[in-house]
Image (spheres, grey):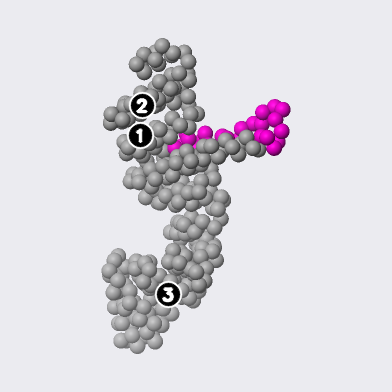
């Protein structure tokens, strides 16, 4: 009957949207999710800005476990939600009446807008393929420009680009993120880490600059500093220390690496091991062999990629001490 209805009123977009949407809901109830999505898409073709249909389609896509479809519908829904505040004032309407109109319209669709935004984020978060996740993020971000999940989405984007080893996009996205929120700790850390590994002239200075900003924002010494802030500050101190080592600024590197080790101990074993290894190396360069042995003895207890390197360096330090070439 619905199919006959759609055919009979095929020249009426509103009737077509209604009929196809009823068919979509019927197929959803019978468990044929693909047909439900197909008919729902036909309904949207006839009424592309219908938020109720978009919400319905997102629900079906969630049932079908299709992350890409969920984000497609969420992004379209976000555009509809965003358009309410951007509508033009009707001619002859007072400013107060227009403000009231926009407020009422936003209030009327808020629950649907919240659902679309949350569904989109959840789909992105559950996406295992970094390439697909990045494509979904690029649809979601412009549709929800002021998303309450903006920082989470940015972090997922940077994680995806790191996995893809797409450094050009990674730096570009990091810069955009910091332009919108200069205090985004994950973005600052990512940029610091990227430049610490980059070999171009001036990269070490950039790594240090970003890391100093992290330390300033994290305030790891504050009474309310949580684990994530201490980890961020520890990673930043470590980055500065290693950047100093690369520039043979051993004296400057030591206090940074000591601060890093103190903050990372018991929090992140591998980062702690890296700070200890760098500190042991720095002490060794200054012939402070007793101090080098102490930190390297701690480093060799930590399983991981730096364990054997720490052991090799400890062996050299012990040999030098035995020969009396240091203190």
Residue in the image at 45% along x and 51% along y:
152
Front-most of residues 236 and 144: 144
User: Cβ–Cβ below 8 Å for labels 2 and 1?
Assistant: yes
Q: Is residue 89 visible?
A: yes
Which badge, 2 or 3, is on the more N-terminal residue?
A: 2
On the image, the x and y values in percent for residue 305 come to 30, 65
Secondary structure category for the residue under label 1 = helix
Q: Quadrant of residue 265?
A: bottom left
Residue in the image at 48% along x and 29% along y:
50
Front-most of residues 42 and 134: 42
The residue that disc 2 covers is 24
Which badge, 1 or 3, is on the more N-terminal residue?
A: 1
Q: Residue 262's mark?
A: 3
On the image, the x and y values in percent for residue 195 come to 47, 58
Label 1 Cα neighbours within 10 Å, binned few <14 / some 14-19 / many ≥20: many
Residue in the image at 30% along x and 71% along y:
302
Q: Residue 60's mark?
A: 1
Q: Quadrant of residue 29?
A: top left
Question: Over which residues does the magenta segment extend?
Answer: 73-98
Q: Residue 276's mark?
A: none
- Give how far apart the Cα atoms at labels 2 and 3 are: 59 Å
Label 2 Cα neighbours within 10 Å, binned few <14 / some 14-19 / many ≥20: many
Does the segment drawn in magenta span residue 228? no
Q: Is residue 121 left or right of residue 180?
A: left
Is residue 11 shown above or below 275?
above
Does the segment drawn in magenta span residue 80? yes
| Figure quadrant of the N terminus | top left
Q: Nearer the viewer, mark 2 or mark 3?
A: 2
Q: Main secondary structure of the magenta part?
A: helix
Residue furthest to the top: 8
Secondary structure category for the residue under label 2 = helix
């Amino acid at each position: 009957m619905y199919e006959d209805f759609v055919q009979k009123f095929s020249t009426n977009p509103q009737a077509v949207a209604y009929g196809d949407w009823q068919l979509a809901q019927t197929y959803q109830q019978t468990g044929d999710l693909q047909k439900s999505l197909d008919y729902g898409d036909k309904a949207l073709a006839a009424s592309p800005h219908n938020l109720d249909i978009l919400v319905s389609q997102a629900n079906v896509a969630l049932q079908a476990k299709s992350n890409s479809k969920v984000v497609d519908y969420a992004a379209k829904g976000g555009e509809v939600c965003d358009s309410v505040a951007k509508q033009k004032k009707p001619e002859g309407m007072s400013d107060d009446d227009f403000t009231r109109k926009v407020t009422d319209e936003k209030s009327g669709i808020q629950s649907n807008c919240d659902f679309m935004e949350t569904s989109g984020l959840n789909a992105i978060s559950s996406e295992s393929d970094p390439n697909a996740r990045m494509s979904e993020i690029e649809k979601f971000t412009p549709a929800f420009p002021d998303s309450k999940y903006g920082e989470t989405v940015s972090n997922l984007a940077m994680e995806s680009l790191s996995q893809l080893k797409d450094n050009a996009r990674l730096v570009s996205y990091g810069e955009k993120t910091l332009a919108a929120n200069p205090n985004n700790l994950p973005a600052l850390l990512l940029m610091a880490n990227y430049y610490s590994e980059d070999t171009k002239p001036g990269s070490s200075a950039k790594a240090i600059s970003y890391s100093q900003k992290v330390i300033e924002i994290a305030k790891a010494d504050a009474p309310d500093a949580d684990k994530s802030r201490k980890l961020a500050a520890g990673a930043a101190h470590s980055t500065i220390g290693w950047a100093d080592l690369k520039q043979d600024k051993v004296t400057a590197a030591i206090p940074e690496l000591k601060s890093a080790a103190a903050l990372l101990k018991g929090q992140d074993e591998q980062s702690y091991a890296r700070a200890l290894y760098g500190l042991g190396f720095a002490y060794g360069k200054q012939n402070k062999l007793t101090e080098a042995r102490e930190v390297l003895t701690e480093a060799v207890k930590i399983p991981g990629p730096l364990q054997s390197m720490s052991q090799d360096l400890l062996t050299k330090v012990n040999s030098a001490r035995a020969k009396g070439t240091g203190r």
